[in-house]
Image (tube, grey):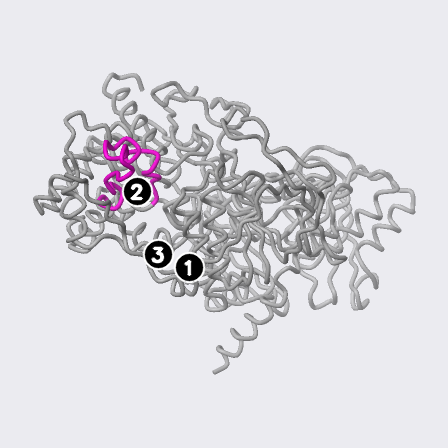
Amino acid sequence: MPVKKRVEMNKLPIEERKNSFNEVALGLTEEQAIEEAKRCLQCPNHPCVSGCPVNVDIPKFIKKIVEKDFLGAYRIIKEKDAIPAITGRVCPQEVQCEAKCTLQRIKEPIAIGALERFIADWAIKEGVIKEEVTRAPSNGIKIAVVGSGPAGITVAADLAKLGYEVTMFEALHKPGGVLVYGIPEFRLPKRIVEYEINYLKDLGVDIKTNTVIGRTYTIKELFQSGFRAVFIGTGAGMPKFLGIPGETLVNIYTANEFLTRVNLMKAYLFPKYDTPIKIGRKVAVIGGGNVAMDAARTAIRLKAEEVYIVYRRTEEEMPARRDEVINAKEEGVKFQLLTQPIRFVGDKENKLIGIECLRMQLGEPDESGRRRPIPIKGSEFIFEVDSAIIAIGCHPNPLIAKTTPEIKVNEEGCIIVDEECRSSMKGVYAAGDIILGEATVIEAMGTGRIASTTIHKDIKNGKI
Amino acid sequence: MPQKNQILAKRELAPRIIEIEVYNPDIASKVKAGQFIVIRVGEECERIPLTIADWNSKDGTITIVFQEVGVSTYKLGKLNVGETIMDVVGPLGNPSEIDRFGTVVCIGGGVGIPAIYPITRELKNAGNKIISIIGARSKNLLIYEDKMMNVSDELRITTDDGSKGRKGFVSDELRDLLKSGLKVDRVITVGPAIMMKVCAEVTKPYNIKTIASLNPIMVCGMGMCAACRVEVNGKTRFVCFEGPEFDAHKVNFDILLMRLNAYKSEEQMALKIYLEGRSE
């Protein structure tokens, strides 16, 4: 019997996408979800689960969908994943669970991400989230979670369920970390993030915004005020620069600034909202990852006439998810490949007017396994643009390490932890991008799960 | 007990220059001279950085001085005693370097005077001889004169129009001071970028260590967005996280000045809309 084709989510029409920040992927209908769930082979060795950093019991929840027991499916997912409406949207399933799916062999893996999202959205729509909150009676032990991104959310949820008194500290005015300042509305609606954050509040997690650990309180002060353990999930948020002349010119943004202005400060609603953004007519986004795609697609929505991804290798080597590259292209983003910026060019008012670039060719693979870009001699040219967005990645946030010398970091600035996420300072644990460098939402959550397990274990064993 | 971020006192120091006292014990118990906060007045407002002019750790209050220049500061100015600021985060930035340097010239211009005040006080307490130079466009815009007097061995005043003190700029007074042959060990300057630029030019030939507390446009205030980056000694530096104080002789003030003006037209448009909406 031939295997049925994978069911794909419907997307918003392209014209509507270019003109609004509404979510692009529309999710599966109930019929679509059941049809897709029925394709699952229910492999006894469930290879998909090993592809999931938080080990969601994927075949089991899919079976529940076939049985139309959506609440049952929700409970199974939620056992391992505190924020399924988010991971269902932003996980790179194609290199994780779906890559391990037996049906991947015929290039028709189960749409696991879409099914997860379907269940999570169903739970939000039916309002079952609040009823599903179950936590052990309080054990009175206070835990500090620093950072409210994916790693911190996982640790806070895990430990709150076990009865710990969790306080979560966030430096910005809204909790969610990269989920609120970084990932745009059209990929992850902020109301979804709010729902998931509210689940933490329902679990009794006390969320303190506007609190910068390292400045407002130090780690030592947290211990002095009665916290038994401190978890650090402050992420990688300090933008990298190219290190080329002209980076401080006007109308050059880091992706973080650009996306923070638009997502967190709602600059796309200026002047109703006070934070402005300047986009210009022609925009270059430098980089080839998911953040670069987010920035480019945001620029399209801000009505830039021409938006280019400037990337030094070819499309094949781009770290961005394939879907995001397709979305960007559909929306009119152009690709200026094999191009390396070497200098930003400003006018006499120090405003950006162009980027001097070199053309590249691909050589042998480098340590990342991708073919190394090699400059072509004498190929310099000026790429004329009105604004540029630098999206080449971020360093780990340095503030805590800087203010707490007991916490050791490596040369990249990542907090050094043992295999169970213990840092070099007693009682301090870390996970997510602050130990990984730059990883995905779900990888951050996976290490967060290790950290929460260790914290619980160390407390039970009287180690801290 | 007051609420967190509640305004406990408010005074108009000069036309459009307002001083408020805000209840925030966490910040009040932590702040050191030279640090700042980032605030968001309400849901639709920008995040803006403001230097902490004074604090009382016992009462849990911090003092902020600001000038109503854009929509955000106008909205802040509209808040009355008893009302609260939606978001206040801090203290941010590195504290000012306080040591016994010898003779220190402390320069403040406009709303930079309240910003230099706690730095001057700490330098005075550390045993330095303090010569302060403060300046404003006009006599009625000169603020914190008494406070600066209390923490200085000598206070010099300039106004652009000559309505008080010397007619001219703080940099003119600084130039004459150095010409007189006085041995100065350190100069620290807070105020408009152009003022700090000129002060740095004045001290350069004398090779006097000169510190400027920079005031770029900022969004996050914690090293995440890089909106506040400046070029110092040819390198990209974050004012919020690595500053706000830098060696003034190494700062590229021309780029800072341009970046400060990056949103001029948007700011003016937003203010016009805001003021029109208010008068309806």
Tell me which amino acid carries mark 1: Thr
**Residue A181, numbered label:** none
Image quarter hosting the C terminus of chain A: top left
Q: CA distance from mark 2 to mark 1?
A: 36 Å
Residue at (28, 44) in percent of width and height:
A88
x, y (%) of residue A421? 36, 23
Residue for badge 1: B84
- Up the image or down, B96 lies above or below A194; here it is above
Q: Which quadrant of the figure has residue A207?
A: top left
**Residue A87, numbered label:** 2
Most extreme residue toward the bottom is: B280
Most extreme residue toward the right is: B180
Q: Is residue B120 magenta?
A: no
Choose between B259 and B195: the one closer to the eye. Answer: B259
- Up the image or down, B165 lies above or below A424; here it is below
Q: Secondary structure at mark 1?
A: loop
Residue for badge 3: A24
Residue at (18, 45) in percent of width and height:
A36
- The mark lying in front, picked from 1 and 3, is 3
Can residue A155 be spotted in the picture?
A: no
| Marks 3 and 2 in Cβ contact (< 8 Å) | no
Q: Which region is colored magenta?
A: A90-116
Image quarter hosting the N terminus of chain A: top left
Q: Chain of mark 2?
A: A
- Up the image or down, A9 lies above or below A177; here it is below
Q: Is residue A98 magenta?
A: yes
Can residue A464 be spotted in the picture?
A: yes
Tell me which amino acid carries mark 2: Thr
Q: Residues within 10 Å of mark 2 (few under 14, many from 20)?
A: many
Choose between A289 and B268: the one closer to the eye. Answer: A289
